[in-house]
């Protein structure tokens, strides 16, 4: 009988899912809205309605042996989402317990960026690498840190939140409640805010001045950078500098062999990679210079978080 794990990646806008086999092949992928429901119960009812519909298309005979979930502020130890700033549902949500209402199988939950790191290690460019950092650049900035082959969770399950380290005292307001967090500068919304700050000072020669705040996104900024738009290029340089500087701190903490970038902003390729590498080398402590490779995820066109969350189950299946 064919066995599958349901891999789920909960994002601020959409939740992606798929049925993943032991070899890392995803079947019956789909998505469901995350931001349309004020109650977690309504969200889960809709999500698992969509998942169960897709399950009907799997070739029989088959069975689901577990559910793996990557979620913002996901606590691996407790199976909970705890005070996630980018989700509608506040407080501490016993998600793993609630999911058992729909599938009476083992449920494992972790931070969405941790899931992406696992996906990269099991199925992507980090195979054979025991020390690396995964940075996810989307609506926020997530990070998963693997040291000596294991994810770093810390004593409470929340270790490795690089997106909420401080870039600037009393800087940009962050959804977590603090000011100046890294993700307010290095993320899809972050680079958009940088563009508008630059335009306020000098918009000469930039096509970006034509767009309202709501019309602009990181893909548009990337497309204009390819046309040598001066503001778009400067925004990527500033974003890469901030990211490179903060990653230099992380290198000193964990000495990774590689740093992988994943997500919408990472699809900008060298526009984000080159300044990040440049400033990482400029700011990193001497013994680490030239030792850390910064590169895009090898799973950029696959759902790395769905793969990674499924591996939470598969790694325990003999």
Image (spheres, rainbow, N blue to C red):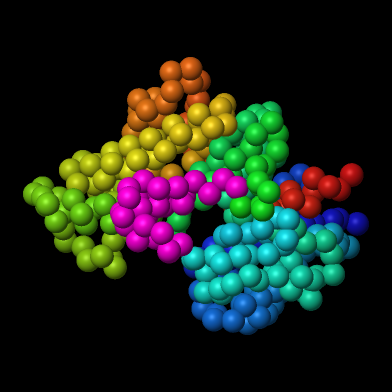
- Total number of numbered discs in the rendering: 0
Q: Residue at x 50, y 30 (%)?
A: 251
Which quadrant: the N terminus? bottom right
Residue 54 in view of the camera: no
Q: Indicate whether 105 appears above or below 188.
A: below
**Could you tell me what secondary structure mostly forms the magenta stretch?**
loop
Q: Residue at x 79, y 52 (%)?
A: 313
Magenta residue check for 168: yes
Q: As drawn, is 104 to the left or to the right of 286?
A: right
Question: Residue 114 versus residue 14: which sits nearer the camera?
Answer: 114
Q: Position of residue 215 (x, y in %)?
A: 28, 66
Q: Residue at x 89, y 44 (%)?
A: 318
Q: As drawn, is 236 to the left or to the right of 11?
A: left
Q: Position of residue 126 (x, y in %)?
A: 62, 33
Report the span colored magenta: 159-187
* Farthest left residue in view: 204
User: What is the quadrant of residue 8 in the picture?
Assistant: bottom right
Q: Position of residue 30 (x, y in %)?
A: 62, 65
Q: Indicate whether 289 appears above or below 253.
A: above
Q: Position of residue 229 (x, y in %)?
A: 19, 45
Question: Residue 290 versus residue 67: which sits nearer the camera?
Answer: 290
Q: As drawn, is 255 to the left or to the right of 276?
A: right
Question: Residue 78 versus residue 156: which sits nearer the camera?
Answer: 156
Q: As drawn, is 207 to the left or to the right of 63?
A: left
Magenta residue check for 132: no
Residue 268 in view of the camera: yes
Q: Indicate whether 223 appears above or below 214.
A: above
Q: Residue at x 18, y 43 (%)?
A: 230
């Amino acid at each position: 009988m064919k066995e599958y794990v349901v891999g789920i990646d909960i994002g601020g806008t959409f939740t992606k899912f798929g049925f993943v086999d032991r070899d890392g092949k995803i079947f019956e992928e789909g998505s469901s809205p995350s931001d349309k429901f004020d109650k977690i119960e309504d969200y889960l009812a809709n999500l698992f309605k969509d998942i169960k519909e897709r399950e009907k298309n799997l070739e029989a005979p088959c069975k689901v042996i577990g559910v793996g979930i990557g979620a913002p502020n996901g606590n691996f130890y407790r199976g909970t989402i705890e005070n996630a700033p980018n989700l509608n549902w506040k407080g501490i949500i016993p998600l793993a317990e609630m999911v058992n209402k729909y599938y009476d199988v083992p449920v494992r939950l972790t931070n969405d960026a941790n899931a992406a790191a696992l996906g990269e290690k099991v199925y992507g460019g980090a195979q054979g690498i025991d020390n690396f950092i995964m940075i996810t650049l989307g609506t926020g900035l997530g990070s998963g840190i693997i040291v000596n082959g294991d994810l770093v969770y810390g004593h409470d399950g929340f270790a490795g939140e690089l997106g909420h380290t401080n870039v600037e005292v009393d800087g940009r307001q962050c959804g977590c409640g603090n000011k100046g967090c890294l993700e307010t500068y290095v993320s899809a919304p972050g680079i958009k805010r940088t563009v508008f700050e630059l335009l306020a000072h000098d918009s000469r020669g930039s096509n970006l001045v034509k767009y309202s705040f709501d019309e602009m996104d990181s893909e548009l900024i990337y497309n204009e950078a390819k046309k040598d738009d001066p503001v778009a290029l400067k925004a990527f340089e500033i974003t890469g500098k901030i990211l490179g500087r903060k990653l230099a701190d992380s290198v000193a903490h964990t000495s990774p062999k590689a740093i992988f970038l994943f997500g919408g902003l990472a699809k900008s390729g060298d526009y984000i990679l080159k300044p990040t590498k440049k400033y990482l080398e400029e700011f990193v402590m001497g013994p680490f210079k030239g030792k850390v490779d910064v590169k895009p995820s090898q799973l950029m066109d696959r759902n790395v978080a769905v793969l990674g969350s499924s591996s939470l189950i598969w790694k325990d299946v003999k």
